[in-house]
Amino acid sequence: MKKSRWMFGAALIALPLLLAGCVGSVENFSGEPEKFAGEPGGDPDSGVQAFWLHEGAQLAITISGSSGCPYIVSSITVVEEADEGNRISADVPALPDDKVCTMDYVPHTTVFSTPGTITTTKPLTIEVMDTEIVLPIK
């Protein structure tokens, strides 16, 4: 009986996240992806880029900044599904004000499973840190 209550509670917590189209990261690392499909999205000079990985099964967002205080995308949310515009929003928490950061400029990548409601056969618009980038077709 306790197990079924626990499972029911877990399902209630997970349901809003699934309905919102919110996806958590599967991996994050310093640097850029070594292998990616198609052309990257975004201007390398802007410090924000996106990449299709594993033939579109995953999506990587790379943000350049301090190696001691990297910007890490915490989640992505589908804003417009494939048939409505193919757009996602990336949530990047603010850096702590009291942390001392290095003055270097290095890329940091966060990887996500590609949400099932977007497509790799249309350009994907990504809203991240007051910037909008377009990831080309895979």
Image: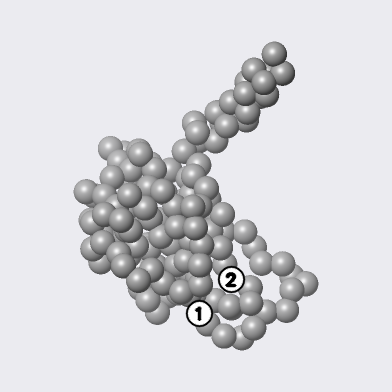
In front of the other: 129 or 77: 77
Near mark 2 (Cα within 10 A), the count class, few <14, some 14-19 or many ≥20, is many
Q: Earlier in the sequence, mark 2 or mark 1?
A: 2
User: Relative to 87, is 98 above or below?
Assistant: below
The spot of residue 110 in percent (x, y) is: 48, 61
User: Mark 1: which amino acid?
Assistant: Val
Label 2–label 1 contact, CB within 8 A: yes
Where residue 42 sits, quadrant-wise, is bottom left
Q: Work out whether residue 88 can be spotted.
A: yes
The spot of residue 63 in percent (x, y) is: 48, 69
Residue drawn at (51%, 62%), measured in percent from left and top?
28
Q: How much space separates mark 2 and mark 1, taking CA atoms?
A: 8 Å
User: Relative to 80, is 6 above or below?
Assistant: above
Task: Identify the secondary structure beneath mark 2.
Answer: loop
Near mark 1 (Cα within 10 A), the count class, few <14, some 14-19 or many ≥20, is some
Q: Which residue is mark 1?
A: 106
